[in-house]
Image (cartoon, rainbow, N blue to C red):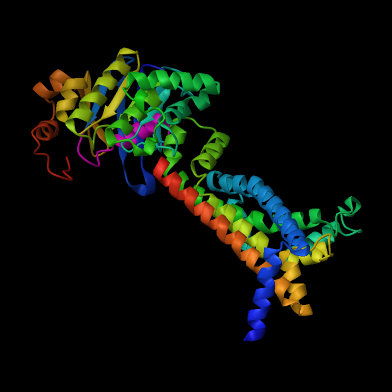
Amino acid sequence: MYGLAATFSDAFALLATFDHRAVEIVSLSLQVSGSAVILGTLLGLPLGACLAVGRFPGRSAALVVINGLMGAPSVVVGVVVYLILSRSGPLGELGMLYTPAAMVAAQTLLVVPLMAAIARQIIDDTWQRYAEEFRAMRFTWLQSVTTLLYDCRHSLLVAVLAGLGRAMSEVGAVMIVGGNIDHATRVMTTAIALETSKGDLPLAIALGIVLVAVILVLNAAAFAMRAWAMRRYG
Amino acid sequence: MFPLRLHDVRFQPNGRMVLDGIELELGGEGITLVLGPNGAGKSVLLRTICGLLEPTGGQIDWGGGARPHLGVMMVFQHPMMLRAPVLENVALALKPHGVPRIERRRRAARMLDRVGLLARASDSARLLSGGEQQRLALARAWVTAPRLLLLDEPTASLDPSATAEVERIVREIRTDGTRIVMTTHNLGQATRLGDDVVFMSAGRVREHASVQRFFARPASDEARLFIQGELPWRMNF
């Protein structure tokens, strides 16, 4: 019991003193996952809107694939990105493997289907109610998509948060394509896994606390924003 | 675009006859009120004219030409309101017309002034009352200067004061040169607004006459019973 208390005490001490290792790892984690979520938002939300509004051959198959990829194991995504970025892969010449850029690519690939699937569901519900009026106004397909994305902007925060949660909490893909290299590609999840296996629990717990806190703070902010939007826009 | 002629127009989804050989000719001016019991096919007729539903048979002739891409607008009984300010909701309708954003907002503001909502331009559209939302929907249609405006029971759930305001706006839109076709269950409204009446039942046009003649001398027993409020539900003629 004393050991556990001492471990937590050491973990809080690391946080209170802004331990440079912890700060470096947290900073890289936020950069990598933040970049992946920004890319995921730019790709996934429009993709979800297109799937909601569009009626084209193969749409049902596309929906099945997107929904299926929502739950794709991160290690599988990691292996796919590894094969693409490895020296003999199609993008091997870019020399991205074991860099934060490779981690961003892997996490983006992980979050796009998730964000697209959630966005499609949200936008589809709104589209059912708006479709006739948009068609009566002679909206083009693109005008419908952009207007729906704008109208659902507050609800779509859910998709963004889900993407962020997925990106920040996954370990398999970044471990494979990043390599968990100290001072280069070590992020919170890979560091927690490594430090736990080494027995350095204070750092693992400190990073775990930060990880949970970041997700809680972002969720609280999103909740407050949605509540404000409901009051402001109904 | 006019005269707009519907010849033997049918709409029969899944084998159920909703429009059963509609014959109708509409000139280029005035307000036509479409009356009839629930399920007569009034709303479906408007949606078919608007192009939202493809008829399963018959022809719609737009003054000898093709259906115009723009120039036909429709206002629904429960208009959609974007989660955005009132001004944005009106300006929205000008997007397909290729109007630049600043000009869209300028025209929308002018139209809000005409429907008495300029003071609420920056309020959220979803927080307006039912009557105000319907006025917004009329402004949204009007701002595009349509040649033909289709109104599907725009006052169905409004109180008398809001109804009077909507009727004032409808008259103004007509004065601006827009042809209006409107469904309603309100016979008083038909006499106040209408130039002519199309009476429908069971997916057919039973009568098309001037308002005065329709109410003074309805040509069919069915129309007479409808005016007297005695038309039995699901009556088969």
Image quarter of the N terminus of chain B? top left
**Residue B139, percent from left and from top:** 37, 24
Question: Residue B236, position in %: x, y?
Answer: 17, 43
- Residue A86 or residue B50, whichever sits in front: A86
Magenta highlight range: B36-54
Task: Say whether residue A165 is left or right of residue A130.
Answer: right
Residue A88, picture quadrant: bottom right
Q: Is residue A45 magenta?
A: no
- Residue at 81 percent of width and 62 percent of height: A178
Displayed quadrant of residue B98: top right
Q: How many marks?
A: 0
Q: Residue furthest bottom?
A: A1
The answer to whether one can see residue B140 in this image is yes
Residue at the spot 47% in from the left edge and 19% down from the top edge: B106
Identify whether B230 is placed above or below A92.
Answer: above
Quarter-of-image position of residue B46? top left
The percent position of residue A113, horizontal first and vertical second, equals 64, 56
Of A131 and B10, which appears nearest the observer?
A131
Question: Vertical placement of A69 versus B43: above or below?
Answer: below
Is B139 left or right of A122, judged from the image as shown? left
- Please identify the quadrant where the C terminus of chain B is shown: top left
Residue A141 at x, y = what percent?
56, 36
**Residue drawn at (68%, 52%) of the image:** A34
Q: Is residue A171 visible?
A: no
Q: Is residue B53 inside the magenta stretch?
A: yes
Which residue lies at the image location 68% right of the left edge and 59% below the top edge? Answer: A110
Above or below for A87 versus B80: below
